[in-house]
Image (tube, rainbow, N blue to C red):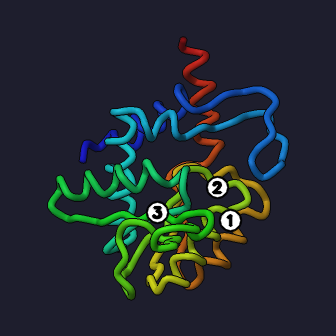
Amino acid sequence: MPSNSREQLLNLLATNSFRLGDFTLSSGLKSDYYIDCRTTTLHAQGAELTGQVFLELFQQRGWNPGAIGGLTLGADPIVVAVSVISSQQRTPIHGFLVRKAEKSHGMGNRIEGFQKTGASVVIVDDVCTTGQSTIQAIEAARAFGFNVIGAACLVERLEANGRPAVEQAAAPAKFISVFTSDDVKAAHLKHREIG
């Protein structure tokens, strides 16, 4: 992995995903900035960098999951990116997606994709504000029978109750973030000064 993948990913988030303004978040909270990580995680280079950075993070933590997954839609591009990059590196990590509710037709699954009871998994998300998406995914993964060994988000918004709620839900597994909203905002403002 190139040593500057993390920095390149932060720069893409700062230029592609960060906006200043007046926003209402999915949590209902008001904010003077918005981070839409999908404009980065669905960007060709951004997807590759996302996969590389998450894999490096897992390796640093000593996490060796059989699969990663998270609540659809924010986690979807991260899951695919990590799965593809891990396969290219000959250390495959499979992917699964967690539906917001069980399907009302077909197999009625809430977990789609990788489904091996007892497998060690990491839960991922794009942005963590209140942590509810991550918590729902952790609960669904455990209810399915996965062993959740960690939880990770691309950008943590640093809201007062977000991290504690996710840490409590994930315990004894650890919750980590690649970047904070402060990191992305600082990089965004730096680009505006230069640009």
SS class of the residue under badge 3? strand
Q: How many marks?
A: 3
Look at the numbered discs 1 and 2 and tell me whether their residues touch, using CB distance below 8 Å: yes
State the CA–CA distance, disc 1 to disc 3. 22 Å
Taking 105 as reference, is 47 above or below it? above
> Can you tell which of label 3 and label 2 is closer to the viewer?
3
Q: Where residue 43 sits in the image (x, y, percent)?
A: 41, 33
Q: Which mark is residue 163?
A: 1
User: Could you tell me which quadrant the C terminus lies in?
Assistant: top right
Q: Where residue 152 sits in the image (x, y, percent)?
A: 51, 62
Label located before the other in sequence (1 or 3): 3
Residue on which disc 3 sits: 97
Is 85 left or right of 128, judged from the image as shown?
A: left
Is 57 left or right of 108, judged from the image as shown?
A: left
Picture quarter containing residue 61? bottom left
Q: Where residue 71 sits in the image (x, y, percent)?
A: 55, 61
Q: Is residue 64 visible?
A: no
Q: Residue at x 60, y 48 (%)?
A: 180
Q: Residue at x 17, y 56 (%)?
A: 89
Residue on which disc 2 sits: 128
Is 10 left or right of 91, judged from the image as shown?
A: right
